C-alpha cells in the first residue's frame, strides 16, 4: 500500500453540465444545473443528489408512478441500471454519482 500523500486537484464546475475528473475509474461525478427539461440516461446504477432547488423526475418506462417524483434540496434519488432514461424538470442543481463509465448522457 502506497501511503504517499497526493496533492488534490481542485476542480470548478463549468457550464450547465460538468463531469468532474476522478482518479478512480470506478466512480463518476457530474454536476447538472436543471433549468429546463434535462434528460439523464443511466449507464449503470446511479444516485442523483439535489443540492439546490426542487426538481421533478419522470421516467417514461416506469409503470409504478402516475406522475413526476418531486425531489427537493438535500434529498436524493436512486436510479437503477435498468428502466431507461429519466427526465428532470424544474429548477435546481443535481449531482449525479455513478459507478464509473461515461455518466454524461
Image: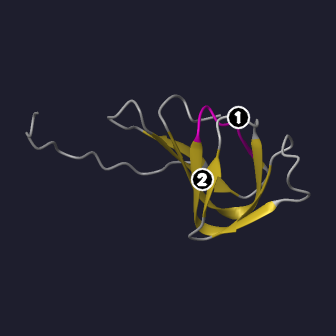
The residue lying at 59 percent from left, 33 percent from top is: 44
Which residue is under mark 1?
82
Residue 104 at x, y percent in the picture: 59, 35
Q: Quadrant of the C terminus?
A: top right
Q: Secondary structure at mark 2?
A: strand
Q: State the separation of the CA atoms marked 2 and 1.
A: 15 Å
Q: Earlier in the sequence, mark 2 or mark 1?
A: 2
Determine crowd level at label 1: few under 14, some 14-19, many 20+ residues with C-alpha closer than 10 A: few
The residue lying at 51 percent from left, 28 percent from top is: 101
Circle 2/circle 1 CB separation < 8 Å: no
The residue lying at 51 percent from left, 48 percent from top is: 14
Give the label on residue 44, or none.
none
**Considering only vertical position in the picture, is 80 above or below 64?**
above
- Asked which quadrant contains residue 24, the reply is top left
Q: Secondary structure at mark 1?
A: loop
**Considering only vertical position in the picture, is 46 above or below 44?**
below
Q: Is residue 28 left or right of residue 11?
A: right
State the residue in front, 48 or 82: 82
Residue farthest front in this picture = 64
38 within the magenta span: no
Residue 66 at x, y percent in the picture: 91, 57
Residue 12 at x, y percent in the picture: 41, 51
Which residue is under mark 2?
48
Residue 41 at x, y percent in the picture: 69, 36
- Magenta part, dominant SS: loop
44 within the magenta span: yes
Q: Which residues are magenta?
A: 39-45
- Indicate how the structure is coloured in the image: secondary structure
Q: Nearer the viewer, mark 2 or mark 1?
A: 1
Amino acid at each position: 500500500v502506497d501511503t504517499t500523500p497526493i496533492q488534490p486537484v481542485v476542480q470548478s464546475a463549468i457550464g450547465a453540465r460538468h463531469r468532474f475528473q476522478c482518479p478512480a475509474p470506478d466512480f463518476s461525478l457530474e454536476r447538472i444545473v436543471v433549468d429546463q427539461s434535462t434528460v439523464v440516461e443511466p449507464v449503470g446504477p446511479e444516485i442523483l443528489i439535489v443540492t439546490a432547488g426542487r426538481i421533478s423526475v419522470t421516467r417514461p418506462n416506469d409503470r409504478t408512478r402516475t406522475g413526476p417524483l418531486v425531489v427537493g434540496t438535500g434529498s436524493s434519488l436512486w436510479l437503477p441500471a435498468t428502466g431507461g432514461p429519466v427526465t428532470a424538470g424544474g429548477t435546481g442543481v443535481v449531482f449525479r454519482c455513478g459507478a464509473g463509465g461515461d455518466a454524461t448522457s
